[in-house]
Amino acid sequence: MTTPNARQRSVGGRTPAQQNAGAASAQTAFLLPHLKPGMRLLDCGCGPGNVTLELAKAIAPGQVVGIDIDPGILAVAEKNRAQGNVRNVKFQTADVYALPFEESSFNAAYAGALRGHLSEPLRALREMRRVLKPGGLIGIRDADFAGLLVWPPCEAIQKAHDVYWKVVQHYGRTSGFSRDARAILREAGFARCVGLAFYEYLGTPEETRAYAELEIRFTEQQPYYRVALEQGWVDQAALAQMREELRAWGEHPDAFFARSLCAAIGWKEA
């Protein structure tokens, strides 16, 4: 589940801009202090490439390779790359369980919002470790939906997330919890692992209205709602009521939304 134009702040109180002086987006702020110009970095599950392009700035003139299983979304990523005239990025279709790279090919790897799409995240992380050079590092970041903060209380938002994760688990994927990010990196064989946490938040009328409309569009278009209907987890009347509640919440002058995200960094020792 995405949030439009969301801002982030670390639990330590520093804004992402303070953490990385605007060098990359808030989504990668936790990783940036460990990146250096000239590195070669792998972005796994890069989607439309927004984060990939930001990472490219941090390691220029080094190269970032962004991979995704979906050729369609990579076409969007390539369009974004061309529009931004970013030259040190390459996008290619690849399976995170069988990366088409030799061992010790990269200095760093990043996987943001990927784990919830994987049925075997540990296997994927071990494959990422394989392609890292000794001394290379990985950063992972995912939402932890137990940390939702919503005001005024809106049952429809909780229902929307509940339906989403029921469908995710129906397909054998992992749950919506990422607080064990440090533990899973250690289990995958990484060393000196460090865990971190952030909050993503929406706190202006424009942001909360946009988020409500995004959730409404999801109930109308997303495949997982069709699955939920087939499984009997919701019905059309319930979806109609959710949309009504979401729109009312988004228009409320005091509306506020935040969710927690957990991240971790680990190293591949020689």
Image (cartoon, rainbow, N blue to C red):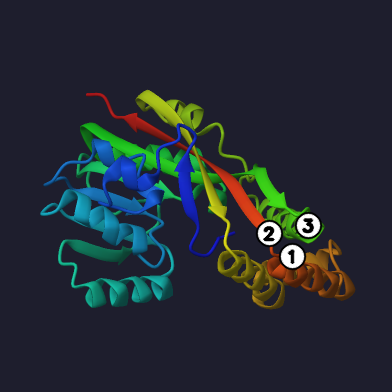
- Quarter of the rendering containing residue 100: bottom left
Give the residue at mark 1: 249
Q: CA distance from mark 2 to mark 1?
A: 6 Å
Give the residue at mark 2: 255
Check if mark 2's residue and mark 1's residue have beta carbons within 8 Å. yes
Q: Amino acid at mark 1?
A: Trp
- Quarter of the rendering containing residue 13: top left
What's the residue at 30%, 65% (across, down)?
A: 92
What's the residue at 30%, 77% (across, down)?
A: 79
Please indicate whether residue 96 sits to the left or right of residue 166 in the image. Answer: left
Give the residue at mark 3: 154
Q: Position of residue 63 (x, y in %)?
A: 17, 55
Q: Position of residue 27 (x, y in %)?
A: 41, 50
Please indicate whether residue 208 sits to the left or right of residue 154 in the image. Answer: left
- Mark 1 surroundings within 10 Å by alpha-carbon count, few (fewer than 14), some (14 through 19), many (20 or more): many
- Mark 3 surroundings within 10 Å by alpha-carbon count, few (fewer than 14), some (14 through 19), many (20 or more): some
Relative height, residue 202 to residue 265 (above, below): below
What's the residue at 84%, 61% (across, down)?
A: 233
Give the secondary structure at mark 2. Answer: loop
Please indicate whether residue 61 sits to the left or right of residue 143 in the image. Answer: left
Give the camera-side residue of 47 and 26: 26
What's the residue at 81%, 56% (across, down)?
A: 155
